[in-house]
């Protein structure tokens, strides 16, 4: 695929841009003297100091003028900084501050920071209430913020101040139409709400009719107008009576309606919770039916979120609005779900839902101390009680996911302890809890203590490791592992396995527990055996991918892998067994022999993909880690040869790569995985919210698209859609890898096929994110290549690239020293020039045209062609033609291109020269009076068929030169 948009086709110009700059009289005749307000232009005329006072310009005037210059050059961030500085220097109460606020508002509008634009315009109006421009900018900002009612109110005020202003008339007309449509929609919504309540309450209505009515109310409640109508129709009371219905689907639908009413609205959330009552809500959260308790918990979460966050649906137009103090209500809700955490009557599903609320509720926002409030109210201790639950003891109802949820919650809380003092406090509470359990001198309390330590080892590992190091803990674990009770053995071996997660901290534990694991490996119980296998797998993986670091005997890792495979492939096996088998393989698959064994085993690969498709969060990380190991997509550091020599001389250990980890073997494994359908598994895994898991998935996707022959298959199976999502969310490493994978796809595939519809616009942002100095040169290059192809598709894509601020980044890489990156950036800019917005940038007072002209004189043929193509399109404008001729070496550059043997380069150069001749007589004379004329005449006599496009351009050039009477035609000479 070519990466340069051809500017000619079949000898004709593909795009002729008419970019004549109108004179001031023409502007006046078109728009009148006063009836047009530019959307975001600064007030330059009124801000410029008069010539008579130029000797007495103040600091604020100089800074203001500098800001005006930046604004005219399109450097809005710099202009904003100048106006801000001017505000700092101007005295409070000064009327000139209104101008600075107005200008800042204009900058914010250009930068699409509409909230700040409205604020600055309001500040200007506080000083000058009748300022038309400030009021206009406030209206524009409010319109962009979709605060149409407030914008309409301000526009009505503005039209009274300036009734003949056409821009204001147009704005008011748009807002009037929108307000009218909203009113009509509201009327329709009111009728729909009433009819749905009628259908819900009819005595003769069957279950299906009532479900449909409730589902329709959910849709209506998601809209602000619909939610308000339902609430005002006494909807909460009407809906409550259906919560005890025998139809589970109907009950879930009613709870979802209540969730929508609570979302983003302080007062409604408070009213819903108050009318529903917390005890009743707790009853539904504690339901034995998972769907009901999840929906009820969501009502609670939406209520808490609405009380904590800024309102999104209540009227916004008032700075005077009183924000209610909901501190007491929020604390009541916290204490309520804290009580549910250890409630013996609540179901396991309900307990999971409550823990999920804790996970979402506690992360610190805007400096609040929710985590500390949670801890000081006994939340951490209650969570440890849940984490220490043993299903067989049946003290609290839990599910198979409860312990994992508890570990995540413990980790989230620990992450919020941002100081050493707070972390010490956290650790003291955990230590106190564990000691209290051990002091009970009962087997049950010992089991609960070890189980809680396992949860901490899976969450805040440092705390778990600290507790294991306390006197007597390891001895209790070993004693329980060697007992005859299978339950004791299982709990103890889990703790030993989890303690082996970090090599640098647990070598002592494993050395003591290794013999125990080997004995438990012989157990008749599959539950104990598979856990012991995972422990041994961790021990065997300490060498990582280092071929020379073998912890276990030769062949032991393969033996362990075969044993784990038995648990993995048998679908009739307990899900818990398959989860542990997947975890064990995630460690063993660091060994190249195991990698080859697994990928060549079709049944094992399919089992891993099936597990991935289940979307089960308990095995997500293990499966993703295994795929990363199989594809060698983990970080690999190549040792410096000089350092290797020094290490050998000092007789230090030097890591060695396994022969089976060479590029050919890795490519073969990736191909096998793709044949088995790994992409479908990755698509399922990518729906997770875990950032670490998303990073692993991005790594595997990138490995899959390394070979361009595989990219079509990845797109066909939905990989591109998932990659767009992965590239926009998650940690920086994952986003970067996903973006690079998208770039590779975009280079070799037709963008319209790879990214159909709206997805083509969505992929622009992650690609531009790769144009960052922290990214590698390869990532920069691939991003530019992909953007080049995207820019050739449509104007909407080019506009998106401009909107995402891609032009400065692309232009920056046109200065890059690396030839391939500079060429790719120039090719991309060549395609982007087809955009009117980009074209106009070259008409301003800058050196953009000069840069392209100089690049057209480089030795790299493809770079010359890209720059020449850009000049050919730009030179349809007289301003650009003048700029080209202002470059000192323009004639040498053109002459060098004209003697090239490349017909396409000749065509582009002649097209540019013809445009220059046509621009005006003075420019034409500069071409005709040089030695270029002889070269051009010689080229015009070349009768080769492939030279026809060149001759067509030269005919155009000579015809105009004759018209200007700079040369005579052949007929005149005769």
Image (cartoon, grey):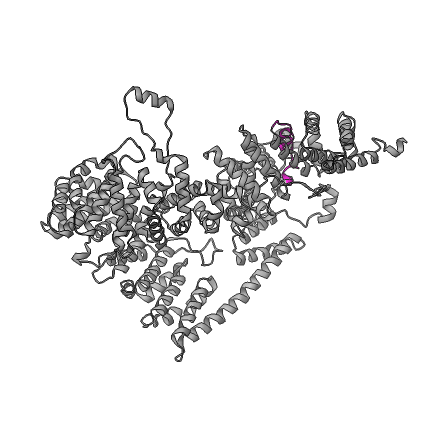
Work out whether residue 98 or residue 863 is closer to the camera in this orientation and state it.
Answer: 863
The magenta stretch spans which residues? 839-859
Q: Is 686 rendered above or below residue 784?
A: below
Seen from this angle, which residue lies furthest right? 974
On the image, the x and y values in percent for residue 549 come to 27, 32
Work out whether residue 795 or residue 287 is closer to the camera in this orientation and state it.
Answer: 795
Seen from this angle, which residue lies furthest top? 649
Q: Quadrant of residue 895?
A: top right
On the image, the x and y values in percent for residue 651 come to 27, 21
Quarter of the C terminus within the rendering:
top right
Work out whether residue 873 or residue 781 is closer to the camera in this orientation and state it.
Answer: 781
Seen from this angle, which residue lies furthest left? 441
Instruction: Say whether residue 256 is left or right of residue 25.
Output: left
Please say whether residue 847 is one of the residues in the magenta stretch: yes
On the image, the x and y values in percent for residue 466 come to 20, 39
Residue depicted at 45% across the width and 34% down the height: 774
Work out whether residue 256 or residue 47 is closer to the camera in this orientation and state it.
Answer: 256
Please say whether residue 923 is one of the residues in the magenta stretch: no
Quarter of the N terminus within the rendering:
top right
Instruction: Say whether residue 931 is left or right of residue 579.
Output: right
């Amino acid at each position: 695929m070519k990466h340069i948009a051809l500017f000619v086709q079949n000898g004709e110009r593909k795009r002729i841009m008419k970019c004549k700059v109108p004179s001031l009289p023409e502007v006046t005749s078109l728009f009148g003297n006063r009836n047009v307000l530019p959307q975001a232009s600064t007030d330059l005329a009124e801000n410029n100091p008069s010539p008579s006072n130029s000797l007495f310009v103040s600091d604020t005037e100089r800074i203001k003028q500098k800001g005006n210059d930046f604004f005219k050059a399109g450097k809005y961030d710099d202009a904003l900084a100048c106006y801000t500085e001017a505000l700092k220097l101007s005295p409070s109460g000064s009327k000139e501050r209104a101008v600075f606020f107005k200008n800042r508002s204009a900058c914010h509008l250009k930068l699409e920071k509409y909230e700040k634009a409205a604020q600055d315009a309001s500040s200007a109006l506080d000083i000058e209430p009748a300022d038309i421009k400030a009021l206009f900018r406030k209206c524009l900002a409010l319109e962009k913020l979709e605060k149409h009612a407030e914008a309409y109110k301000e526009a009505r005020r503005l039209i009274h101040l300036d009734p003949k202003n056409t821009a204001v008339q147009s704005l008011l007309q748009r807002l009037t139409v929108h307000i009218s449509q909203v009113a009509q929609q509201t009327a329709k919504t009111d009728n729909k709400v009433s009819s749905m309540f009628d259908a819900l309450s009819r005595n003769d209505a069957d279950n299906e009719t009532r479900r449909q009515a409730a589902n329709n109310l959910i849709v209506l409640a998601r809209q602000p107008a619909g939610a308000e109508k339902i609430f005002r129709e006494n909807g909460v009371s009407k809906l409550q009576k259906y919560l005890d219905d025998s139809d589970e689907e109907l009950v879930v639908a009613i709870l979802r309606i209540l969730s929508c009413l609570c979302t983003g609205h302080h007062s409604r959330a408070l009213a819903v919770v108050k009318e529903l009552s917390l005890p009743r809500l707790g009853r539904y959260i504690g339901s034995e039916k998972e769907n009901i308790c999840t929906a009820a918990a969501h009502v609670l979460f939406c209520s808490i979120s609405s009380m904590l966050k800024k309102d999104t649906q209540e009227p916004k137009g008032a700075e005077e609005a009183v924000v209610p103090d909901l501190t007491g209500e929020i604390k009541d809700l916290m204490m309520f779900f804290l009580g549910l955490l250890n409630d013996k009557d609540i179901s396991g599903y309900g307990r999971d839902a409550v823990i999920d609320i804790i996970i979402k509720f506690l992360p610190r926002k805007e400096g609040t101390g929710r985590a500390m409030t949670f801890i000081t109210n006994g939340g951490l201790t209650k969570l440890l009680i849940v984490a220490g639950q043993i299903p067989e003891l049946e003290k609290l109802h839990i599910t198979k996911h409860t312990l994992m949820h508890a570990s995540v919650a413990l980790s989230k809380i620990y992450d919020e302890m941002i100081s050493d003092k707070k972390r010490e406090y956290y650790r003291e509470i955990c230590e106190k809890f564990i000691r209290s359990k051990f002091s009970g001198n009962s087997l049950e309390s010992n089991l609960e203590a070890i189980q809680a330590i396992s949860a901490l080892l899976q969450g805040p590992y440092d705390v778990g490791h600290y507790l294991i190091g306390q006197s007597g803990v390891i001895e209790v674990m070993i004693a329980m592992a060697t007992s005859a009770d299978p339950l004791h053995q299982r709990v103890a071996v889990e703790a030993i396995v989890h303690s082996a997660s970090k090599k640098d901290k647990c070598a002592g534990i494993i050395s003591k527990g290794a013999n125990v694991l080997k004995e438990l490996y012989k157990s008749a119980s599959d539950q104990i055996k598979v856990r012991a296998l995972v422990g041994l797998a961790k021990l065997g993986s300490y060498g990582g991918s280092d071929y020379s670091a073998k912890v276990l005997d030769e062949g032991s890792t393969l033996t362990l892998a075969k044993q784990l495979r038995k648990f993995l492939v048998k679908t009739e096996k307990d899900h818990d067994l398959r989860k542990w088998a997947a975890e064990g393989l995630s460690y063993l698959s660091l060994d190249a022999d195991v990698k080859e064994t697994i990928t060549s085993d079709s049944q094992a690969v399919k089992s891993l993909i099936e597990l991935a498709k289940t979307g089960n969060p308990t095995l997500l990380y293990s499966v993703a880690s295994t795929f990363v190991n199989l594809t060698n997509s983990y970080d690999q550091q190549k040792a410096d040869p000089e350092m290797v020599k020094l290490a050998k001389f000092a007789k230090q250990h030097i890591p060695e790569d396994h022969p089976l980890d060479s590029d050919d073997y890795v490519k073969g494994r990736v191909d096998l995985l793709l044949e088995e359908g790994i992409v479908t598994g990755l698509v399922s895994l990518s729906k997770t919210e875990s950032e670490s898991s998303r990073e692993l998935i991005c790594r595997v996707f990138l490995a899959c698209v390394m070979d361009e022959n595989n990219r079509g298959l990845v797109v066909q199976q939905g990989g591109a859609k998932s990659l767009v999502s992965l590239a926009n969310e998650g940690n920086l490493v994952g986003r970067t890898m996903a973006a690079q994978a998208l770039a590779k796809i975009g280079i070799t595939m037709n963008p319209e096929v790879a990214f159909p519809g709206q997805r083509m616009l969505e992929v622009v942002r992650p690609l531009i994110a790769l144009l960052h100095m922290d990214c590698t040169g390869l990532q920069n290059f691939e991003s530019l290549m992909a953007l080049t192809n995207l820019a050739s598709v449509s104007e909407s894509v080019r506009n998106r690239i401009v909107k995402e601020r891609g032009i400065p980044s692309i232009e920056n890489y046109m200065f890059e020293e690396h030839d391939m990156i500079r060429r790719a950036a120039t090719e991309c800019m060549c395609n982007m020039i087809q955009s009117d917005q980009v074209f106009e940038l070259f008409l301003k007072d800058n050196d953009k045209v000069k840069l392209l002209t100089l690049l057209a004189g480089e030795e790299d043929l493809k770079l010359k062609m890209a720059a020449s193509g850009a000049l050919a399109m730009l030179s349809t404008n007289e301003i650009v033609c003048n700029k080209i001729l202002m470059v000192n070496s323009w004639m040498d550059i053109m002459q060098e291109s004209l003697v090239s043997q490349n017909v396409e380069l000749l065509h582009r150069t002649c097209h540019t020269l013809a445009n220059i001749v046509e621009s005006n007589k003075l420019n034409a004379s500069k071409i005709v009076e040089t030695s270029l004329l002889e070269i051009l005449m010689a080229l015009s006599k070349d009768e080769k068929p492939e030279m026809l496009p060149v001759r067509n351009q030269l005919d155009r050039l000579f015809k105009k030169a004759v018209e200007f009477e700079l040369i005579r035609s052949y007929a005149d000479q005769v």
